[in-house]
Amino acid sequence: MKKSIINYQPSTMYIIMPVKIKHLLLGILFLGVQINGLSQTAKKNLTIGVSFAKEIQSSVSKDGRLLLFFTQNPNVEPREMTWPYPWSPCYIFAKNFSDINLNKALVLNDFSDWTQSTEWSLDNIPEGEYYVQCVWYQNTDVANVNAPGNYFGEKQKVSVSDQLAINMTINQVIPERTIVENELARMVDFKSDTLSKWWGRPVSLKASVLLPSGYDANKEYAIRYNVAGYGGRYDRVNRLLSDAAFMDWWNLPESPQVINVYLDGEGPFGDSYHMDSENSGPHGYALVYELILHIEKTYRGTNTAKNRFIDGCSTGGWVSLGLQLYYPDFFDGVFSYSPDAVDFENYQLIDIYKDQNAFINETGYLRPVMRDVSGEPWISMKDFVKYENVLGRSNTYLDSGGQFSAHAALYSPKGANGLPIPLFDPLTGKIDSEVAEYWKKYDFKIYLEENWETLGPKIAGKIYIWMGDMDHFYLNPATRSLDETFDNMVNPESDAMVSFSAMEGHCSMFSDRIVLEKIQEKLDEE
C-alpha cells in the first residue's frame, strides 16, 4: 500500500524562499513610495547617457541589449532584481542595439520603442529618489542578464524631477563563478560531445562536488545529485562550505559518507531542466550518459545505479522527479521538494488543456502567480511575465532566461524563428491549444498513467515528494493531483511517499542535511 506522511517536521531547515518580515515591511514602505509617485505622471524631459569605459572596450561586443534598472530600495543591487519581488520592486527597461560606436556615449531621450516591466515608461517616470544601474547583455550562450561576460555600471542614486539627465558608465565585467577553496570541494567542467554536436559549438556542463569527510579515492561511495532551484548555479556549494554549522556536522565521522554533486543547468533559454527538448537539445542524454559517468569514474569508484540518488527543490524538485521517472533504472531514489507543476491541468492556477487565457481566469480576474502563506496574492501572472518579456532579447519571455522561458524551451516545439512556440501569447496571455497538446509529453500525471505497467515496478521504493499546502507559487494542487494518481495505481500498487505540510510555503522544509539523512536511512535499510 502507498505510504503517506503528514506534517513531517525536520530537525534542521534551510529556507529557500527569501521571505522575511523585515522584507515585507520594506515592501510596504517602498510600495507606499511607489503609489505616491505614480500619481505624478507628467511627461519628463529625461536624457540618459551611457558610455563604455576605455579599459573594457576591446572585449565589449558592438551588439547587445541595454537594460536599465530603477529601484527605490537602497539595500539591493538593482541588476540582481530580475524577479518582481513584491517587497522590493524594481523597474526594468530594455532595448537591443547593433553596431554601436564604443568610443561614443549612447544618448537616450526617446523611449517609445523600449520594452518595460512597468505600466509607466521612462517618459513619465514617477518623481522620487531612485537607485539606477545599467547592464550590457552580450553573452548569447546563456539566457541570463547577470551571466559571466556581461558588463555593468555601478549603482547610483538619482532624484527624478521634471528635467533629469543621468550619465552612466559601463566599466565592470561580471566574472566567472568560483568555488570556495576547501579540501573536500571540487569543480567539474566537462565538454559534452552530444550537446556540442547539437549546437555546432563547444558546450560544457559544469558541476561542483562535495566529498565526504572520510573520503578515500580507493573506495566506492553512494552518490547524491542535487538539482538547483530556478537560477541556481554550481557554485551554490559555497553556501554549505561557508556554513559553519553544516560543515561541523559534515566533518563528523558519523556523518553520511555520501558524495554530493551540485548540478548546473544553465543554457540558452534559461535552466535546461536536464531533460531532452527540441529547443535546448539532448540535455537529459548528456547528463545521464556523459556527465554523470564522467563524475563517477573520477570520484565514486563505480558507475552502477545502486545507491545513486537525486534530489532538489522547486525547479530541482521537478527535475529530480522527472529524471527518476524518465530514467527509472538509472537512479535509486528521488527526494523531490516543492516541485514545479507536475500536472498541467494544474499549471499553477491554469488548466492549459481547458483554459483560454493564462493571465485572466474564467471569471475575468487576473490570475495570481505568487502569494504569501496566508493566501494573500503578491503578483499576477501578467505582471510576472512582463518582467520576463523585458529580459528577453526577443522582447518576449521566450528567451528571457526566466521560469516561463525555460518551460517553453523544454515543453514546446521549436518555431520557425528559432524560438520555442509559446504556450501563451506574451502580451495577451491567450493559450494555444495545439501547443498545450504538445506539452503532454512532460505531464507527469499522463506519463504515469500511460506507462505504469512497466514503470511502476522500476520506481517501487524510490519516490519521496514533499509539498507545503500553502506553496508560494500555487504548486500544491498539481502535487495533490499526482498524489491521487499514485493512490489509484494498481498492478502494482504504488508505494510512493507523498508528504503535505499544512501552512508551509515553497521549499520551507528543504535542507541538504535532511536529504542526506534520508539517504543514509535508505542505505541503512539495505
Image: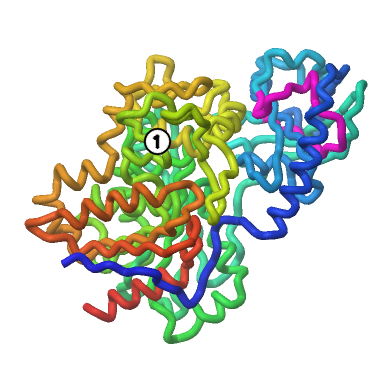
Is 21 drawn above or below residue 43 in the view shown?
below
Q: What residue sits right under mark 1 in the picture?
A: 350
Asked if residue 144 is among those painted magenta in the image, a careful observer would answer no
| Image quadrant in which the N terminus is located | bottom left
> Toward the viewer: 432 or 233?
432
- Point out residue 300 in the picture as x, y percentages from the top left corner: 34, 67
Q: Is residue 325 left or right of residue 145?
A: left
Coloring scheme of the render? Answer: rainbow
Secondary structure beneath disc 1? loop
Residue at coordinates 55% horizontally, 76% vertically from top-left? 247
Q: Between residue 75 and residue 171, name the one nearer to us.
A: 75
Q: Residue 416 location, x and y as percent?
A: 38, 15
Q: Name the residue at the bottom extreme.
A: 253
Please name the residue shown 40% across and 69% down the image. 515
Quarter location, residue 49: top right
Q: Residue 446 appears in which quarter of the rendering?
A: top left
- Residue that sits furthest to the left in the current view: 491
Q: Residue 19: x, y in percent?
A: 62, 56
Is residue 128 highlighted in magenta? yes
Looking at the rendered structure, the kind of residue marked 1 is Ile
* Picture residue at 22% right of the left edge, 78% below the top: 526
Q: Is residue 42 above or below residue 314?
A: above
Residue drawn at x 52%, y 39% as measured from the top left: 368
Q: Is residue 87 visible?
A: yes
Bounds of the magenta segment? 116-136
Q: Is residue 51 visible?
A: no
Horizontal side of residue 244 vs 495, given as left or right: right
Relative to 165, say whether 178 is above or below. Answer: below
Q: Is residue 228 left or right of residue 220?
A: right
Q: How many marks?
A: 1
